[in-house]
Image (tube, rainbow, N blue to C red):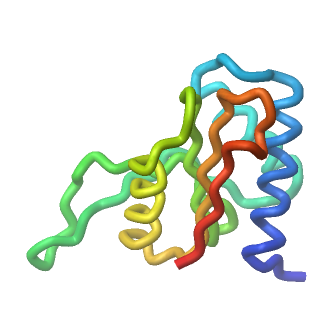
Amino acid sequence: MELKNKDITDKILGAAIRVHRVLGPGLLESVYETCLAFELQQAGLGVRRQIALPVHYGGIALDAGFTIDLIINELVIVELKAVDKLNPIHEAQLMTYLRLSGLDTGLLINFNVLRLMDDVIRRVL
């Protein structure tokens, strides 16, 4: 059975909550990324980490230094943060990654909060 984007984002959020319950806030983003990737793989989802995202300009792909944290099942971008509060620039980053990648669903998750779901943004192009 093929999972739809909403089903995938629900699984991602469930896994993120599990990671946050165990680790809590205050760690580096890379720690949360590693643990979330593990949780998602254990759940049977396809996970790619730290994917370079070129900018297509003038007919060629240019390395502009963009890196997507996670792509799940080749359908959903997950951007992770460990900051005091998500800012509009973080959401703009997610929207840019969606537009440049051609994917239409993304999650922005901030692990540096007391309750994880207080700082999660889901966007669909």
Residue 27 location, x and y as percent? Answer: 65, 18
23 or 49: nearer the viewer: 23
Q: In which quarter of the image is residue 118?
A: top right
Residue 46 location, x and y as percent? Answer: 72, 60
Q: Quadrant of residue 37?
A: top right
Give the residue displayed 68% in from the left and 33% down from the top. 111
5 or 44: nearer the viewer: 5
Residue 35 location, x and y as percent? Answer: 74, 33
**Left or right placement of residue 35 versus residue 68 in this view:** right
Give the residue displayed 65% in from the left and 62% down from the top. 122
Q: Which quarter shows the N terminus?
A: bottom right
Give the residue displayed 79% in from the left and 22% down from the top. 24
Where 44 falls versus 23 (above or below)? below
**In the image, farthest residue toward the top:** 26
74 or 10: nearer the viewer: 10
Give the residue displayed 23% in from the left and 52% down from the top. 64
Residue 36 location, x and y as percent? Answer: 74, 40
Number of disc labels: 0
**In the image, farthest residue toward the left:** 58
**Left or right placement of residue 71 versus residue 25 in this view:** left
**Left or right placement of residue 30 versus residue 113 in this view:** left
